[in-house]
Image (cartoon, grey):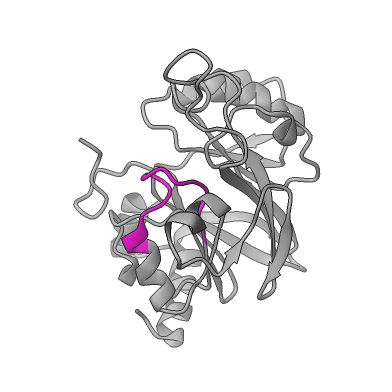
Amino acid sequence: MRSATVSAVLLLALALLVTAVPAAQEAQEAQEAPVGPVYTEPEFGEVYVLPLFHASLLLQYGDTVIQVDPTSRVDYYDFPDADIVLITDTHGDHFDRDAATMLMALGAKVVAPPAVADEWGGVDLVLENGFGEMVDDVYIQAIPAYNIEHGPAKDVVYHPMGRGNGYVITLGGKRIYISGDTECIEDVQTLENIDIAFMCMNLPFTMSPGEAAECVKKFKPKIVYPYHYRGSDLDVFKWQLEDTPEVEVRILDWYPPSSRLPRPQ
C-alpha cells in the first residue's frame, strides 16, 4: 500500500480532479474514476467519495479512509490505506472475504453485522441493528436493512430482518447514510438530518428506481447518490425527485468499462 506521504498526494490529486483544473492525464483519470467532494463547508473541509464497483465505495475525510463492502474486483493498492471497512451483508456482492481480509491485514478495522461475524472471524466490531459505537474518530450506527416485499418465493424475502446493516456514519461533521440491501422500511423513512445518502436499487432484490426515489422523499437527505443500481433506469430516479428540490441528486458511475473494474458476466 502507499505510504502516508503518497496518500496525501493522492488526496491532493482527487481535489484537483474536481476543481476543473486538471492536467490532460489527470482529466483522463477523472473520466475513468469519477470523484468529487460530496459536502464542503469551511469549518469541516471536504468529504470525498469514489465509486468503485456496484456496492463498493471509498469515503475519505482528511487522513481517514473508509472502504464500504470491498470487492476483489478492485485493486486496493491504488488507494490510500483504509482505516475502517464497513460490511453490510453476507451476500457476495457485499461480503468478499478475500478483499476484507487483505484490508484488515493492512490495518483496517472491520465493522459488520453478526451474520457476517458468524461466517468469519475477522470482524473487529460487530454491530447489531440499532446499535452504534465510535471507531477511531468516526461514529458508526447500524441501521436495519431488509426486504418487506421482494423475494424469490411467497413469504420468502431476499434479505430477512436482522441479517444486514445499513450504516449512518458521522464523518467530517456530516451524517452519511449507506443503505446496503434494503427496501423502504420505517427505519429508513424516519432517518433524520442526513447530509449524504447512498441509496440502493436493483430489482428484484431491493427497490425499483421509483421506489427508491419515493423513499428518499421520506427522509430528504441533502445529497443522494444512487448506487448498487445495476440495470436500473437512473433517469426514473432523477425524474421522480424533480419535485423535491431540497434533495440534490448526484450520479456517478459504479460500473466503469475498465479492465480493473470489469462488468459482471
* Viewer can see residue 162: yes
The structure residue drawn at horizontal position 73% and vertical position 48%, both measured from the top left corner, is: 130
Q: Nearer the viewer, residue 38 or 60?
A: 60
The structure residue drawn at horizontal position 40% and vertical position 78%, both measured from the top left corner, is: 106
Q: Quadrant of the N terminus?
A: bottom left
Is the magenta region chiefly helix, strand or loop? Answer: loop
Magenta-span inclusion, residue 90: yes
Tell me which segment is drawn in magenta.
86-99
Magenta-span inclusion, residue 243: no
In which quarter of the view is residue 60 placed? bottom right
The percent position of residue 165, horizontal first and vertical second, equals: 59, 46
Total marks drawn?
0
The percent position of residue 158, horizontal first and vertical second, equals: 47, 28
Q: Quadrant of the C terminus?
A: top left
Q: Is residue 180 left or right of residue 31?
A: right
Q: Is residue 114 left or right of residue 17?
A: right
The percent position of residue 143, horizontal first and vertical second, equals: 68, 45
Relative to residue 120, is residue 102 depicted above or below?
below
Q: Is residue 11 left or right of residue 218?
A: left
The structure residue drawn at horizontal position 59% and vertical position 26%, both measured from the top left corner, is: 212
Residue positioned most to the top: 154
Residue positioned most to the front: 118
In which quarter of the view is residue 256 placed? top left
* Viewer can see residue 220: no
Q: Nearer the viewer, residue 177 or 97?
A: 97
The structure residue drawn at horizontal position 70% and vertical position 35%, both measured from the top left corner, is: 188
The percent position of residue 251, horizontal first and vertical second, equals: 49, 38
